[in-house]
Image (cartoon, rainbow, N blue to C red):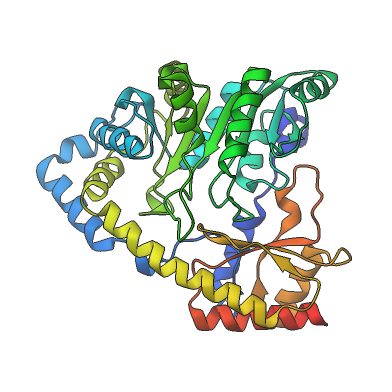
Amino acid sequence: MNWDQVFASRASRMKASEIRELLKLLAQPDIISFAGGIPDPALFPARAFQDAYAAVFAENPGAALQYSVSEGYPPLRAWLAAHMATLGIPCTADNILITSGSQQALDYLGKLLLSPGDTALVGWPTYLGALGAFNAYEPHYDRLDPETNRSAADYAETAAAKGGRVKFAYMSVDFANPTGRTMDRAARERVLEMADDLDMAVIEDAAYQALRYDGEAIPPILALEIARRGSIEECRTLYCGSFSKSLAPGLRIGWVCGAQRAIAQMVLLKQAGDLHTTTINQMAMDRVARTVFDDHVAGLRRTYAERRDHMLAALERHMPKGVTWTKPEGGMFVWLTLPPQVDGADLLAQSLKTQRVAFVPGGAFFADGSGCNTLRLSFSLADKATIDEGIRRLGLLLAA
């Protein structure tokens, strides 16, 4: 069987995630890894989940092991609606869809919004997982940069020349993966103006929103749009949230919040995809979120803030002249820009061979393949001593 002859044309756009491949290195004990944006498992609220699963099985094992509604476990959706209200997003459970991680949400949104040849506006760089989710639906990409004065007409004309139209803008506005940067309020407002001019959707990836360590919190784009329009039902923004960075990535529970018309259409995709997210995991997550979420996230902020500060200080000590980096207010990442002649992928190969330090080359995060002289470091998993040693080794390699 020659499978290449029967694969759909979209299969050629699917590529292995460089980050997923790099995570295999974690099994090698001598590797210092700054590669994956992985929460520290020592910080998981394991006892809270142990108690939650025990309670679920004691009280209602039949429901826990049964099929459930595609929209998601109603009590968890109710808790999430209340949580969204604290972010300035008044809504009901009918505005919430539970997904199998926020990655599934991105896949569904690509399937829902993109026809082959349409254009998606993304950052330069942007989240690698989003590109992977959207690629299967055969879009073109254009650079989203709301801080420039590029006109909506220019975006529309460029998309039309490629045979489609602009369907959405995708961005992570708080402590973005991979750069750690935060989009200011003016830029968020500008995105909404562009969305009106282009009649496009806005996908707001809020995976790291809860992990702010300093600086002033800025309202989510969906909150700003509701303030403009008065109701979530009039909004074009879809907010993608996740418990992966705050409570437990292994349970694969994310959510989408938006207008009921859009959520109802995504429910149809859920029914055709995996029917519903695992019932027992949703039931356990509901119990844990209600009992420990705020206190647990406060503890994460303290620990991760210390690791961020330690990495920034190590970079100051060990990086040679010509290397610059971001100073994120939250999240899990620092973004390095190297001298123009240094290729991040080549540097990784040398680093693994001679220094045993892993990171993610930056080129993978650019839709056009640029950005070769960049790389992403994650500070969430390593302790202070490991951070200092790994940055020291990386600095030696760059200096050489």
Residue toward you, 229 or 352: 229
Q: In this view of the protein, which residue sits in the foreground, 151 or 237?
A: 151
Residue situated furthest right in the rendering: 341
Q: Measured from the top left, where is residue 131 in percent x and y?
A: 66, 40
Q: Is residue 385 left or right of residue 65?
A: right
Vertical placement of 385 versus 125: above or below? below
Left or right: 19 as drawn, with respect to 174: right
Q: Nearer the viewer, residue 78 or 337?
A: 337
Q: Position of residue 163 (x, y in %)?
A: 81, 18
- In the rendered image of this protein, does residue 143 appear above or below residue 154? below
Name the residue located 81 percent from the left edge and 57 percent from the top edge. Answer: 372
User: Can residue 7 be seen by looking at this rendering?
Assistant: no
Look at the image and tell me whether residue 121 can be seen.
yes
Name the quadrant of the N terminus: top right
Q: Residue furthest left?
A: 59
Residue drawn at point x = 27 percent, y = 48 percent = 289
Residue 48's x, y, as percent?
Answer: 22, 58
Residue 359 locus on image (x, y percent): 66, 66
Q: Residue at x 69, y 42 (%)?
A: 123
Whether residue 88 is situated above or below residue 338 in the rendered picture:
above
Where, by quadrant of the figure, is residue 197 drawn?
top right
Q: Count the labels in the image.
A: 0
Quadrant for the C terminus in the image: bottom right
